[in-house]
Image: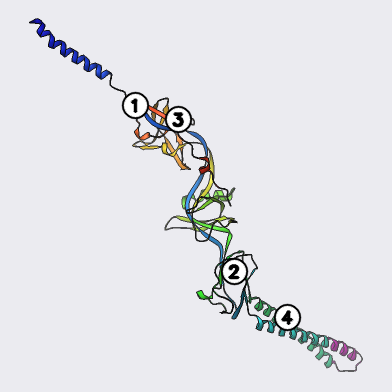
Amino acid sequence: MKANFRMPALAAAAIALAGIAGAQEAPRRPPISVTVAQATTSSLPYEIDSIGSVQAIASIQMRSRVDAQVESIAVPDGATVSKGDVLVKLDSRQISAQLRQAQAQLARDQAQLEQNLRDVKRYTELVEKKATPQINLDNSKTATLATKAQIAGDEAAIENLKVQLSYYTILAPVSGKVGTFSLRSGNMVRANDNTPTGVLVTINQIAPIYVALSIPQRYLPDLRAAMNGAGALVEARPQGQSNWIDGKVAVLDNTIDPATGMLVARGEFANKDEALWPGQLCDVKVRLRVDDNLTTVPREAVQVGQKGNYVFVANGDKVALRTIKVGREQGGRTIVLEGVKPGETIVVEGANLLRDGASIAARPQQKPDAKSASKPSAS
């Protein structure tokens, strides 16, 4: 009978011991796979991102200053022209005839002046010999002065006619690109026609060219300091394209818009290859300066919690949560002002799965493709 009582007790003890052993042999959590990168000492540009629109430095609507018939169009639609190139020739036969008439009148008056001078000389000799009255000499001198005045008037008339004649040959006032001509040979044009149909053609100066952009007023001190120093560099990339084009900030408006707090600036670009075209929208970066010796980490490494920003610092196969103080972001990097030192290994991907002291299986972050990261040459 005693043996029968011992068997259940032994069985219960065995079950209890098995439970304890099972608890002690529970599987450990596997390490969490993460991507890591080192905090580095970097030089980062201090840049402003904006959207800009391309504007011709000069956009001039060409109108006729005289009533005339178009004789010829000297350049095709869309042509590239230099300052002083002939754009349109108007029928100038009438004004040319008036000019020749005025030149003939000048020649007559110059001949008359020579006659007057001879008369003055002759009457001077006769008066000295008392062979003619003084009044004849006085009259010849008066006639000489009148003829000189007439000649001055002739010369002024000729100059005026030459100016008017120049209006019949319409020249490019700047180097640039013409648009589409609104007229053809044989059409009539009117003087100073301010209607839309009075525009013969529009010429845009596009090399160099402007990109206009708006900048928040808080950047004005830094922008002015850059312009007064080595210059504020600006990069523009037409939307839908990949190439960045280098220029410089050339103009600041003299007023900040009180409604928006924005300041209009203009970047100037050489644009020799005509990559920028009036009316285009561009992504724009204005570089105010380059800051050196900054501690930076990949932007994705920075997490936000109740106590502020933090990162996970890897040490072997463990991580530690580290609260940090951050500065600005630029080019995918975040500046760390406090909390991380250069050379420390930071978790970049997988941080959302971690807690302080967690085990990790780390792999290094892949560097971007050098070809895709490189910036095209500027124009």
Residue in front for this viewpoint, 30 or 156: 30
**Callout 1–callout 2 Cβ contact below 8 Å:** no
Within-10-Å neighbours for mark 2: few <14, some 14–19, many 20+: few
Identify the amino acid type marked 4.
Glu
Q: CA distance from mark 3 to mark 4?
A: 88 Å
Disc on res. 155:
4
Q: Is residue 24 left or right of residue 197?
A: left
Q: How is the image coloured?
A: rainbow
Range drawn in magenta: 117-134
The residue under label 2 is 76
The residue under label 1 is 30
Coordinates of residue 28 in the picture (x, y in percent): 31, 23
Residue in front for this viewpoint, 56 or 262: 56
Within-10-Å neighbours for mark 1: few <14, some 14–19, many 20+: few
What secondary structure is found at the residue carrying circle 1?
A: loop
The residue under label 3 is 345
Identify the amino acid type marked 3.
Thr
Q: Earlier in the sequence, mark 3 or mark 4?
A: 4
Q: CA distance from mark 2 to mark 4?
A: 38 Å
* Residue drawn where x is 90% and y is 91% of the image: 126
